[in-house]
């Protein structure tokens, strides 16, 4: 196995990581170092209900941090109108920084808010698709994820829905990267087994796709390896023992590390098809990943043979040693397939697209969207509509 080195690459991960005991207590000092003394807190109604928002506010007040406002009315899909609405509240409150506590939607909304406040103006729509933005106003930004999957706390990407046009817009900029990412098990323990399972399998997919992407590089691969190892060891424990702090922290780290990896290397065909299956048939993202991972890896196996063989070493070193070189890539797929099956015995995760409610008559629509998804560009093997249809059939 020889390590791949591209002739040129870039890698950015500027978020400072606070991980483990007392991470929440240290936010006050970090925000103050960044120049914020009146941050605005974004979260959602669910987290308010289970008490996480109050726990956080209590910790802040003990450490002397006063928030200038709290906004929890964030829908499941972040939205352009919501970002614009929160921006006007933020300005009215004279806030000087952002703290986001939540899952993907809260974090993406906060990223949109950060971009809008930093760049100025009243409508975030103006900045959709813009990769190159001038360095705007300094808006200190801390993210506390409450799920361990999207890795959004470590990426420069936000997906925000334009509800008027019914489309999800992708915002990409290194200025969307949080200044601080906070992984604290107190904010993660309320995750139910199904969410732990599907978000964990999303993170695993990030690591596998980033490791084998055409845009891979030694740094993103090193990150991907660490994430895979953590997930294989700790995801089953985090599902079985929701209050096992070590397993929760390990999974939070894995999601962050995999996020930093794919934010630089991009993902691949599992995500290209998964985004479409989500948009057309409403299958939750992580569940779509868990269903499409194995059929997509089988599709890629010849083009990604070397990378998949390496993956076997990281997820099952003993099996790697006893498997002849030419069979290692297929063996890696087998081991991953067994792992996903094992997770399905522990939490309610559906096994096929048909079980997840996808209709065969929607295949064309799904395939048409998938072949136009940006994630396909860096997949190790090119794919056309018929290839996508074949993967969909296999996953059905
Ligand atoms: Fe994902």
Image (tube, grey):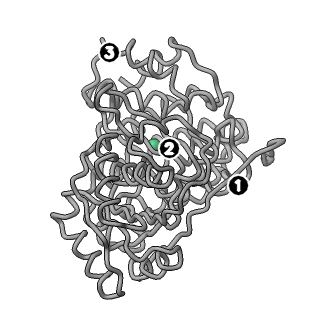
163 or 223, which is in the foreground?
163
Spatial CA distance of label 1 from label 3 is 39 Å
Q: Residue at x 43, y 77 (%)?
A: 27
Which of the 4 image quarters holds residue 283? Answer: top left
Task: Look at mark 1 in the image and give the residue it sits on.
Answer: 219
The 10 Å Cα crowd at callout 1, few under 14, some 14 to 19, many 20 or more, is: some
Q: CB atoms at circles 2 and 3 under 8 Å apart?
A: no
- 389 relative to 168, above or below: above
Between circles 2 and 1, the one closer to the viewer is: 1
Q: Dot 3 lies on which element? A: helix
Task: Provide residue 174's location: percent of width, then percent of height.
Answer: 59, 51
**Quick check: 57 above or below 76?**
below
Q: Which residue is mark 3?
A: 362
Image position, residue 395 (x, y; %): 40, 26
Please tell me the numbered disc located at residue 29.
none
Quarter occupied by residue 225: bottom right
State the residue at coordinates (40%, 64%): 98
Report, in whole angstroms, how far the alpha carbon at label 2 lies from the one at label 3.
24 Å
């Amino acid at each position: 196995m020889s390590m791949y080195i591209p002739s040129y690459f870039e890698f950015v991960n500027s978020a400072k990581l606070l991980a483990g005991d007392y991470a929440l207590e240290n936010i006050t000092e970090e925000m103050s170092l960044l120049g914020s003394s009146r941050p605005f807190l974004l979260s959602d109604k669910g987290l308010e209900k289970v008490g996480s928002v109050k726990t956080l506010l209590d910790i802040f007040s003990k450490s002397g941090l006063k928030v200038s406002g709290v906004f929890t009315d964030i829908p499941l899909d972040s939205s352009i109108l919501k970002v614009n609405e929160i921006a006007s509240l933020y300005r009215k409150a004279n806030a000087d920084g952002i703290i986001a506590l939540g899952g993907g939607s809260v974090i993406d909304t906060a990223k949109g808010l950060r971009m809008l406040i930093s760049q100025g103006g009243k409508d975030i729509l103006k900045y959709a698709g813009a990769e190159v933005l001038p360095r705007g106003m300094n808006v200190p930004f801390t993210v506390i994820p409450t799920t361990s999957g999207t890795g959004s706390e470590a990426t420069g990407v936000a997906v925000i829905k334009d509800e008027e046009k019914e489309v999800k817009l992708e915002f990409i900029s290194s200025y969307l990267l949080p200044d601080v990412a906070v992984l604290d098990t107190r904010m993660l323990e309320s995750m139910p087994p199904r969410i732990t399972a599907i978000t964990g399998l999303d993170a695993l997919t990030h690591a596998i796709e980033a490791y084998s992407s055409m845009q891979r590089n030694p740094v993103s691969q090193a990150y991907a390896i660490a994430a895979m190892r953590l997930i294989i060891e700790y995801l089953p424990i985090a599902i079985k023992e929701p209050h096992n702090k070590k397993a929760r922290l390990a999974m939070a780290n894995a999601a962050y590390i995999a996020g930093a990896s794919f934010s630089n290397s991009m993902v691949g065909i599992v995500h290209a098809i998964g985004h479409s299956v989500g948009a057309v048939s409403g299958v939750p993202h992580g569940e779509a990943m868990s269903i499409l991972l194995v059929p997509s890896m089988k599709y890629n196996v010849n083009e990604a043979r070397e990378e998949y063989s390496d993956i076997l070493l990281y997820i099952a070193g003993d099996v790697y040693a006893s498997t002849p070189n030419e069979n290692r890539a297929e063996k890696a797929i087998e081991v991953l397939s067994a792992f996903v099956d094992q997770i399905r015995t522990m939490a309610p995760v559906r096994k096929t697209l048909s079980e997840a409610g996808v209709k065969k008559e929607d295949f064309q629509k799904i395939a048409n969207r998938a072949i136009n998804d940006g994630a396909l560009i860096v997949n190790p093997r090119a794919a056309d509509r018929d290839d996508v249809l074949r993967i969909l059939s296999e996953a059905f």
